[in-house]
């Protein structure tokens, strides 16, 4: 109980703080921490299932507040989030066919790509919130969603670097919209993994409670941080 709710609190707070779902620390935490505290070890399949439940509810909680932000952009969320939703369903189903080392390799690979993108300096467009290519957003969203579905993530830890480096959106716009996009993406992964039996509800409920309570708190704190600090936090987490 204490371990799961602590992981949920940490993931939920980070989800709101920098606009990610929290999977960047939730997935490895679920794999690594239980054995250290003398509790049963989880497989990569169960860890991804628990992660998907935490990500869905933490991003849902954060999204309720994020959609009220002045930088919230419905078209951006609709196009990229729609692409990610479709991709995440396929990824979640495909994960059942992959081995644990492959699932972990996918996770590490996408995290490394995100880290590289975070250090690419790009000057944001003044009208970046309205000048993006809709079809490109859908395509990129589908690819990210495919990977996110495999590991049970919302994918915000790669969404943010992509929106910053590829679509050249300002940081405040990215943070305000990424958590809502991640919420849409996480729906597919969560539902599929729940149907596959990889979400043990007795453990998931504690992750979810901690996340839902602390995601809005993280969002409030995040408003007080400069963009450079938020970007640094995301880079360190990755």
Image: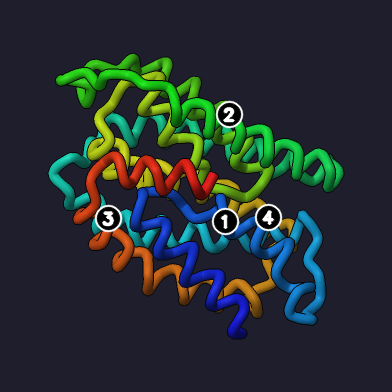
Residue hosting label 4: 48
How crowded pointer 1 is (Cα within 10 Å; few <14, some 14-19, many 20+) is rated as: some
Residue at image x 59%, y 56%? 52
- Residue 109, numbered label: none
Residue hosting label 2: 113
In primary-sequence order, the first of circles 4 and 2 is 4
Element carrying mark 2: helix
Residue hosting label 3: 222
**Disc 2 and disc 1: Cα gap in Å?**
16 Å
Element carrying mark 3: helix
User: Looking at the rendering, in which quadrant would you find the C terminus?
Assistant: top right
In primary-sequence order, the first of circles 1 and 4 is 1
Element carrying mark 1: helix
Residue 210: x and y, percent? 46, 75
Task: Assess whether mark 3 and mark 2 are in contact (beta carbons under 8 angstroms).
Answer: no
Q: Looking at this rendering, what residue extends furthest in the bottom direction? A: 1
Residue hosting label 1: 25
Task: Assess whether mark 4 and mark 1 are in contact (beta carbons under 8 angstroms).
Answer: no
In primary-sequence order, the first of circles 2 and 1 is 1
**Disc 1 and disc 3: Cα gap in Å?**
18 Å
**Disc 4 and disc 3: Cα gap in Å?**
26 Å
């Amino acid at each position: 109980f204490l371990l799961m709710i602590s992981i949920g609190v940490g993931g939920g707070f980070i989800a709101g703080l920098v606009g990610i779902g929290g999977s960047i620390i939730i997935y490895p935490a679920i794999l690594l921490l239980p054995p250290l505290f003398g509790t049963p070890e989880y497989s990569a399949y169960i860890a991804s299932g628990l992660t998907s439940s935490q990500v869905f509810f933490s991003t849902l909680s954060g999204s309720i507040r994020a959609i009220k932000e002045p930088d919230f952009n419905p078209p951006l969320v609709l196009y990229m989030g729609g692409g990610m939703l479709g991709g995440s369903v396929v990824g979640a189903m495909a994960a059942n066919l992959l081995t644990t080392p492959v699932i972990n390799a996918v996770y590490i690979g996408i995290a490394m790509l995100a880290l590289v993108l975070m250090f690419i300096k790009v000057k944001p467009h003044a009208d970046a919130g309205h000048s993006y290519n809709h079809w490109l957003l859908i395509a990129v969203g589908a690819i990210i969603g495919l990977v996110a579905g495999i590991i049970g993530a919302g994918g915000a830890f790669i969404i943010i670097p992509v929106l910053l480096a590829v679509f050249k959106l300002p940081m405040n716009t990215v943070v305000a919209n990424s958590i809502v996009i991640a919420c849409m993406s996480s729906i597919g992964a969560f539902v599929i993994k729940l149907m596959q039996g990889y979400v043990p509800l007795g453990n998931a409920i504690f992750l979810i409670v901690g996340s839902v309570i602390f995601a809005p708190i993280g969002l409030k704190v995040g408003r007080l941080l400069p963009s450079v600090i938020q970007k640094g936090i995301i880079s360190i987490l990755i």
